[in-house]
Amino acid sequence: MCVGSTWATTMTSKQVLLHVESLCAGYGDSVILDDIGFSLAAGSSLALMGRNGVGKSTLLRTLLGHARQRSGVIQFNARDISAATPYARIWQGLGWVPQERLMFPSLTVAEHLAIADRKGAWTCERVYGLFPRLRERQRNLGGQLSGGEQQMLAIARALMTNPTLLLLDEPLEGLAPIVVKEVGECIRRLVEDEGQAIILVEQRVKFALRLTEAALVLDRGRVAYSGSSNDLLNDVQLLDDLIGLRSGSNPQRKRSGYADASETRREPDDMTTGGQS
């Protein structure tokens, strides 16, 4: 395992928000994650990376209590939440932006925000300030929104729970280029201006590494790299070895069962590539 000393030194000067130790998890009898360990400081940002199917989404689901934790410890805000229910983890400060967005087609934008409302700094007005388009569409049903608007709503809904740590699972996937830029800028503002702690799974490797302080790369369900995002971004050979950034490979996605749907694609330096909204 490659470990970045710069990030490890920074961690010691901040309060630990999330600590994962010797984590083994999966679904049913299947083991997807083996001996995972890392820590995240309060207000920090982590890029969770790796090739397709290595367990990135499974790790997020395990933190949320949606996958079977077979062994190990998950500590959040100095509390062991390994046995906590998913809704209890949300109430303790974990926020989730799922890859599938999970909109309610019969609820309006305003109603999506209302059902997630938990007292704190994030209010409807503040969320509408971050996503002005949602204010314009607040009376529209979830099923009437474009893909980009649904993604904005998924992030806004998670913010309404006033999370201490926000988990984002491929928030830019399948969006049109102009929407990728808009949503990406909102995520940047959350991290850099608001100090929101995040764990980000994202195909756009350079965007993710430039946005975050630390990176965790998985390979076959185990940690292959844990260290500084900047160090990894600047080590082209290591990045290619770990993720295949220069290979241009784009295997066909498999969405059967609980398989991790994340993958890495070749990308330009900016964020102007994407799919359909």
Image: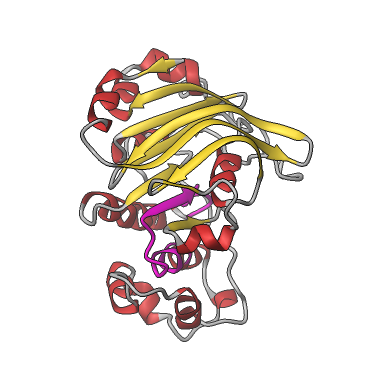
* Residue 157 at x, y percent in the picture: 45, 68
Left-right relation of 36 to 184: right
Identify the residue shown where x is 61% and y is 41%: 58
Indicate whether 57 appears above or below 269. Answer: below
Kindly tell me whether residue 273 is visible in this rendering.
no
Left-right relation of 25 to 27: left
Front in this rendered view, residue 270 or 4: 4
Q: In which quarter of the image is residue 253?
A: top right
* Residue 144 at x, y percent in the picture: 56, 77
The region drawn magenta spans 154-175
Q: How many marks?
A: 0
Identify the residue shown where x is 60% and y is 49%: 83
Kindly tell me whether residue 127 is visible in this rendering.
yes
Indicate whether 143 appears above or below 205. Answer: below
Identify the residue shown where x is 47% and y is 52%: 171
Left-right relation of 129 to 94: left
> Which residue occupies the extreme right position in the image?
29
- Verify whether residue 226 appears in magenta: no
Identify the residue shown where x is 53% and y is 37%: 73
Q: In which quarter of the image is residue 193?
A: bottom left
> Which residue occupies the extreme front position in the image?
79
> Which residue occupies the extreme bottom position in the image?
139
- Verify whether residue 165 appears in magenta: yes
Indicate whether 38 appears above or below 130. Answer: above
Front in this rendered view, residue 60 or 271: 60
* Residue 44 at x, y percent in the picture: 29, 43
Front in this rendered view, residue 8 or 128: 8
